[in-house]
Image (cartoon, rainbow, N blue to C red):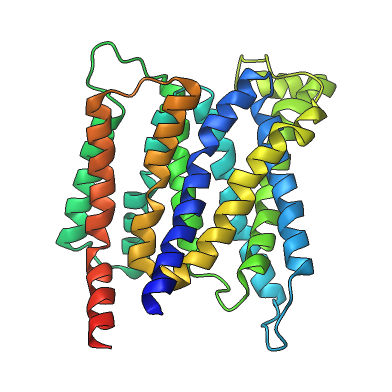
Amino acid sequence: MKEQNTAKGVLLVAIGASSFGMLASFVKLAYKGGYTTAEVTLSQVLLGLLCVTLINTLRKKPADEAKASSKDIRQLILAGTSMGFTSVLYYMAVSYINASIAVVLLMQSVWIGIVLDSIATKTFPNKLKIVSVILILSGTVLATNILASEIQLDIRGVIFGFMAACSFATTLFASGRIANHLAAPKRSMFMLCGAATIVCIFVFVTQIGPNNSEIMMNFYTSFSDNTTGIRDFDWSIFYGWGLVLALFGTVLPPIFLNMGFPLTGVGLGSIISSLELPASVTVAFFVLGEKVILIQWTGILMILGAIVLMNSNLLFKKKSTEVIE
């Protein structure tokens, strides 16, 4: 029975991680359709929030389910702001660099999370984690093919991608420590409220505001000379790419991951969730026609190997426990 539950958990986590991995390619296609970063992020977050709210409202709640206190709600909304920053920064990165490169940069959240955990616990990382960090950084150099003389990485995309990784690591760090006594749909709903707040501010500052106010336009151009996205908001994205982005970026991943992780455990679940990386690169290769050479696949395998290595203690501990039982 335990083996069946574990297999079910592996499948659920794999679906959730792969769904999120496909997202960058869909964003690229939305950009090719003429939509802006503001339109992409707003449609995904608002439609995702609507779906999660409906799920939370319609689901059957047990009689003893914990209720959210005002402190829980404040903390979850605050933690959710990092989700909003991740979406904005990640999609801005995708607008400048290949989807396959963007997801490699996003995966830097693994070692950034180690740093955050070390700061929070005031402990130095063990040798296993240090080796894992070195593998991730080395794999990133290969996966981005940055050493090749012909490679041309837009520095803006690299910066946005790394900032997205920092924000994503913050999201994961906060998600594992805030209001864990609440049901997953309820936690997701409040966190998405925080994400929606950040995205709405971004949309107003970068598109709606400058398009309707000379003062806001002057403010915007003091930071950027790219005014191609300053136009009327195209609401058609909400019944087009917005539905796809919300499904694969906001609805499916948290549902399947929250269902799968309790069955797999943290160690095995973390390893399976790293399928996000090869899924993203593979979809970018077949759907967008992005070139991925052997040295880049080598780097990707190194990053995946580092994630397996970092979770090996938890994984082997789980297996040994099952043998004893």
Left or right: 57 in relation to 292: right
Q: Quadrant of the C terminus?
A: bottom left
Residue for point 39% across, 29% down: 101
Q: Where on the picture, by quarter, is residue 67?
A: bottom right
Which residue is the extreme one toward the top?
Answer: 150
Q: Is residue 239 above or below residue 112?
A: above
Q: Is residue 278 above or below residue 270?
A: above
The answer to whether one can see residue 269 in this image is yes
Q: Nearer the viewer, residue 189 or 51?
A: 51
Residue for point 35% across, 51% down: 110
Q: Where on the picture, by quarter, is residue 10?
A: bottom left
Residue 251 in the image: x percent, y percent?
64, 52
Residue for point 49% across, 52% down: 15
Q: Nearer the viewer, residue 312 or 160?
A: 312
Q: Where on the picture, by quarter, is residue 41?
A: top right
Residue 206 in the image: x percent, y percent?
69, 28
Left or right: 163 in relation to 32: left
Left or right: 156 in relation to 33: left
Q: Nearer the viewer, residue 185 or 41?
A: 185
Residue 157 in the image: x percent, y percent?
46, 26
Residue for point 51% across, 55% down: 171
Q: Quadrant of the N terminus?
A: bottom left
Q: Is residue 19 above or below residue 25?
A: below
The answer to whether one can see residue 159 in this image is no
Left or right: 71 in relation to 267: right
Residue 163 in the image: x percent, y percent?
46, 39
